[in-house]
Amino acid sequence: MYEAVLFLHNLVRWVVLAFGFLALWRPGAKEGAFFAHALTLQVVLGILLAFVSPLFQGALANLEAVMQTPGEARYFVAEHWVGGLVALGLAHAGLSQARKGKPRARLLFALALALVLLSIPWFRPLLRL
């Protein structure tokens, strides 16, 4: 199950990025909804992945040592998911603004997309097959 969820989480990353750039280019309600809802799916898959991932579970079991040592385990335990959740909030705030026709939707989508880009583990394989 771990490999299947990891594959989906990786695949949805590209969908989120595509919809994020679309929402930034055309910050309408439809484009914003695609971005916000794809990002919601990504976060749900990430939460599920945290429960089935041996890396994450092992890091939680030894949390004090993991937090003192920079590296992959600390990145996933402390930074990756926080960026995703904050980006999710910004994307949904942008969607709310887009539905009202407010120009600040583009700013919120840009901030959400920037956080998504910063939260992606670029040091991992870009596509898992």
Image (cartoon, rainbow, N blue to C red):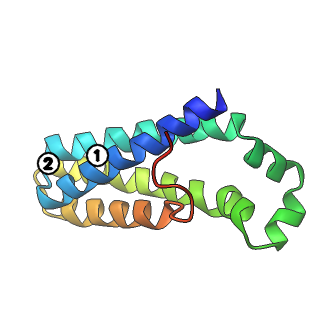
Q: Is residue 61 left or right of residue 48?
A: right
Q: Which badge, 1 or 2, is on the more N-terminal residue?
A: 1
User: How far from the left and from the top, in percent, is residue 129?
Assistant: 49, 39
Gap between marks 1 and 2 measured at Cα? 17 Å
x, y percent for residue 82: 57, 58
Quadrant position of residue 57: top right
Residue 11 against residue 109 in the figure, above or below:
above
Secondary structure beneath dot 2 equals: loop
SS for callout 1: helix
Which quadrant does the N terminus fall into?
top right
Residue extending farthest front? 129
Can residue 44 be seen at all in this image of the molecule?
Answer: no
Task: Categorize mark 1 by other alpha carbons within 10 Å: few (<14), some (14-19), many (20+).
Answer: many
How far across and how far down the image is residue 109, in percent?
27, 59
Label placed on residue 81: none
The quadrant in which residue 66 appears is: bottom right
Q: At 80% across and 67% down in the image, what residue appears?
A: 67
- Residue 81: image location, x then y, percent: 58, 53
Callout 2 amino acid: Lys
Characterize the local packing of mark 2: few (<14), some (14-19) or many (20 or more) Cα atoms within 10 angstroms: few
Observer-nearest of 83 and 123:
123
Q: Say whether residue 48 is left or right of residue 93.
A: right
| 77 on left or right of 42 | right
Question: Residue beneath label 1, please?
Answer: 35
User: What residue is drawn where x is 37% and y is 67%?
Assistant: 114
Give the total number of marks visible in the rendering: 2
Task: Give the residue number, with chain letter if any, for mark 2.
Answer: 100
